[in-house]
Amino acid sequence: MSSIFEAAMLVCFGFSWPMNVRKAIKAKSAKGMSLAFILLIIVGYIAGITAKFMNHQINYVLAVYILNLVIVFTNLVVYFRNRALDRRSEAMKMDVKKSDGESVVLLGGSLDKEIPVAEVAQSFNFNFKMYNRSKYGLSLKDARKTYLESVEPMNPEAVIIHLGKEDVEMFKNNSADFDVKYLELLSSIKHQNKDRRIALVSLEEESKVEVEMNRHIKAIAESEKCEFVNMDRAKLWDTEKTKEVTAFMYELGFDSQLKVKKPLGDISKVLYSYAYQNGLFNEVENVQAV
């Protein structure tokens, strides 16, 4: 009978741990978690299990001890995972603090991931930091989550968004879902900072579907007061000539024109013309085709 009550005590005591693990996973932060407390509980369970073996009490109560120990160990793993997320978030904030001016962030998919935005910004002598937080295969379904995790902690002055390549099927099945996902992303960005500038970049028009998608993206940009950037125009830009012009302006002392308030459309065209003229998009498409 005593074993039953002991098992009941362990079940009641350990019932909170799965909920604690779930809460910690969703929080994605170690703030509020105590490493010392978790380790103390683990030591306690190990001591209880050791006592069971020493007294040769190999029964269902031991199984409950072990189950609780596994769950607490899971909490320990989540703690270190959340610590890593906290450090990454702090590192992003420090990057922004160390920058010469307010930053501009590029958020896109596989094609955008290959653009060395920091190198391009340095090459064109931009007086602000640029960061690339694009993700391979990023779709609008995951864009809001990616933005909140990877972009928002940086508190950028502006965001350039190039999404939709991974959402062709969603658009074909229900274009309203495409619009809703895009608007949810923009709503999240504005909720964090209503003054943040946003540019929406069109897709390459390789099919009638993408032509229609661009029409929707442009309409969304107009309704949400975002800048719309036509990707096709980027192909016409000569990056080397543009670089010569910016260098000449610096020599004359007109650097104020190149500060962070520079139109996002011009920044986008510089990035994508660089990508086109250096064959970055072709490399990604070739890899995807293999």
Image: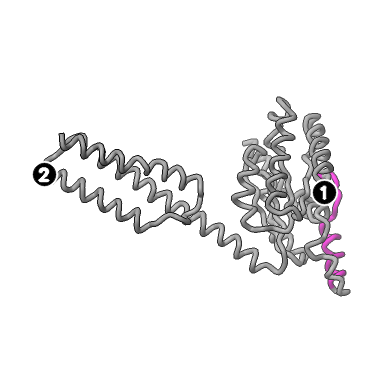
Name the residue rendered at 85%, 47% in the picture: 233
- Amino acid type at circle 2 is Asn
In front of the other: 127 or 157: 157
Examine the rendered structure and indicate whether residue 214 appears above or below residue 51: above
* Residue at image location 75% in from the left, 64% down from the top: 123
Q: Is residue 60 visible?
A: yes
**Rendered position, 180 above or below 240:** above
**Residue depicted at x 72% and y 49%:** 190
Pick the quarter of the image with the N terminus: top left
Left or right? Give the position of 82 relative to 272. left
Magenta stretch, residue numbers: 231-250
Q: Are marks 1 and 2 in contact (CB under 8 Å)?
A: no
Residue at horizontal 87 percent and vertical 71 percent from the top: 254
Number of dots carrying numbers: 2
Q: Quadrant of the C terminus?
A: top right
Please tell me how crowded label 2 is: few (under 14), some (14-19), or many (20+) other residues with Cα within 10 Å.
few
State whether residue 247 is above or below residue 198: below
Q: Tag 1: Cα neighbours inside 10 Å, few (<14), some, or many (≥20)?
A: some
Residue found at the far top of this picture: 173
Q: Which residue is mark 2?
A: 55
Left or right, 147 with respect to 41, comes to right
Any part of residue 206 in sight = no
Q: Is residue 86 left or right of residue 64?
A: right
Provide the secondary structure element on which disc 1 rests. Answer: strand
Is residue 242 located in the magenta-colored stretch of the structure? yes
- Residue 227 disc label: 1
Quarter where residue 18 is shown: top left
Specify the quadrant of the image occupied by residue 52: top left
Q: CA distance from mark 1 to mark 2?
A: 73 Å
Q: Secondary structure at mark 2?
A: loop
Identify residue type, mark 1: Glu
